[in-house]
């Protein structure tokens, strides 16, 4: 990625990407199963996931709210990681952040990484954004990933619009997600699994990582993971 950073109207982008992932508070579902026993929703626990923001977002957030600070690496006391290692892995155009924690969340000032979690825009081998795929590392812990049938159409629409707009302003960001999508195809091909996909057409599909052939499926029929395996539909 080059140094090009497009101007982003961060407030307008946030306002247009504000729908809840599902109609219930999914944090209440995953918090009891947080592997570090903190009882926090997994994606709001700095020991489980470090939020990122575009540099343009940070320029907005640092003056608009006291919710965030730049990640230092000492916020997780249970299992401190090597800050140098994580910083080295972080792409140039992103910054690692830490918030004041879920008890102090300020919903209007959630970063785009909070809003998109657990999803990312899935880009096909021939460069089309066709829908939402999920961060597969969180299969065992994120309740939403095991309950894709609960993801609202409003959220799906806002997600796609957010990234259509973002990519029209910032083609290089499209490349980042094309690379992540390729990583997911490789990971799922190794496991001989198909990729669950919330398509931009409103349907739910399983995507073959080799051919990218799509097979329609009821979202409620998708596999569940970890402690959610036994959940009733
Ligand atoms: S998105 Fe997933 S990890 Fe985050 S609060 Fe909801 S269920 Fe938990
Ligand atoms: S800002 Fe809110 S949604 Fe984002 S990580 Fe912090 S507590 Fe979670």
Image (cartoon, grey):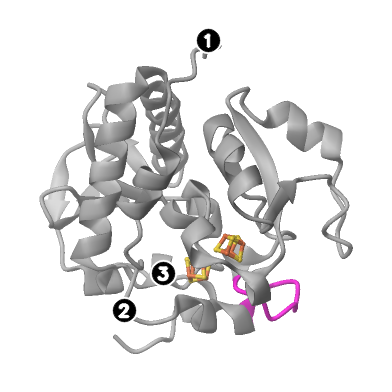
Identify the residue at horizontal 35%, vertical 60% (top origin).
18
- In the shown orientation, is residue 26 left or right of residue 150? right
Q: Overall secondary structure of the magenta stretch?
A: loop
Label 3 element class? helix
Instruction: Quadrant for residue 217, please give it.
Output: bottom left
Seen from this angle, which residue lies furthest front?
Answer: 63
Point out residue 205 in the picture as x, y percentages from the top left corner: 19, 54
Residue on which disc 2 sits: 23
Magenta stretch: includes residue 93: no
Residue on which disc 3 sits: 144
Label 2 near label 1: C-beta < 8 Å? no
In space, the residues marked 2 and 3 are separated at their CA atoms by: 11 Å
Report whether residue 194 is seen: no
- In the shown orientation, is residue 157 left or right of residue 172? left
Q: Identify which residue, 205 or 34, lies in the foreground.
A: 34
Residue on which disc 1 sits: 2
Assess mark 3: CB under 8 A from ligand 1? yes
What range of the chain is rendered magenta? 33-41
Instruction: Quadrant for residue 41, please give it.
Output: bottom right
Label 1 element class? loop
Seen from this angle, which residue lies furthest top?
Answer: 2
Identify the residue at horizontal 35%, vertical 66% (top origin).
21
Q: Is residue 54 above or below residue 1?
A: below
Magenta stretch: includes residue 40: yes
Q: Residues within 10 Å of mark 3 (few under 14, many from 20)?
A: many
Point out residue 221 in the picture as x, y percentages from the top left corner: 23, 72
Comes first in the chain, label 2 or label 3: 2
Q: Is residue 191 above or below residue 78?
A: above
Identify the residue at horizontal 44%, vertical 56% (top origin).
115
In space, the residues marked 3 and 1 are separated at their CA atoms by: 34 Å
């Amino acid at each position: 990625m080059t140094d090009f950073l497009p101007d982003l109207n961060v407030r307008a982008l946030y306002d247009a990407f504000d729908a809840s992932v599902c109609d219930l508070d999914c944090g209440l579902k995953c918090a009891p199963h947080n592997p570090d026993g903190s009882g926090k929703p997994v994606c709001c626990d700095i020991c489980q996931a470090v939020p990122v923001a575009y540099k343009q977002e940070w320029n907005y957030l640092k003056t608009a709210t006291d919710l965030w600070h730049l990640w230092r690496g000492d916020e997780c006391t249970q299992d401190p990681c090597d800050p140098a290692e994580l910083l080295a892995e972080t792409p140039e155009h992103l910054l690692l952040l830490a918030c004041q924690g879920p008890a102090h969340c300020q919903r209007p000032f959630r970063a785009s990484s909070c809003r998109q979690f657990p999803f990312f825009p899935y880009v096909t081998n021939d460069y089309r954004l066709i829908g939402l795929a999920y961060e597969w590392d969180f299969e065992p812990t994120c309740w939403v990933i095991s309950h894709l049938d609960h993801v609202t159409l409003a959220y799906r629409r806002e997600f796609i619009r957010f990234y259509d707009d973002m990519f029209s302003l910032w083609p290089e960001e499209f490349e980042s997600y094309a690379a992540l999508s390729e990583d997911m195809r490789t990971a799922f091909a190794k496991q001989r699994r198909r990729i669950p996909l919330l398509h931009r057409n409103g349907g739910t599909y399983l995507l073959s990582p080799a051919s990218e052939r799509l097979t329609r499926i009821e979202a409620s029929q998708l596999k569940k993971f970890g402690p959610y395996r036994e959940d009733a539909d």
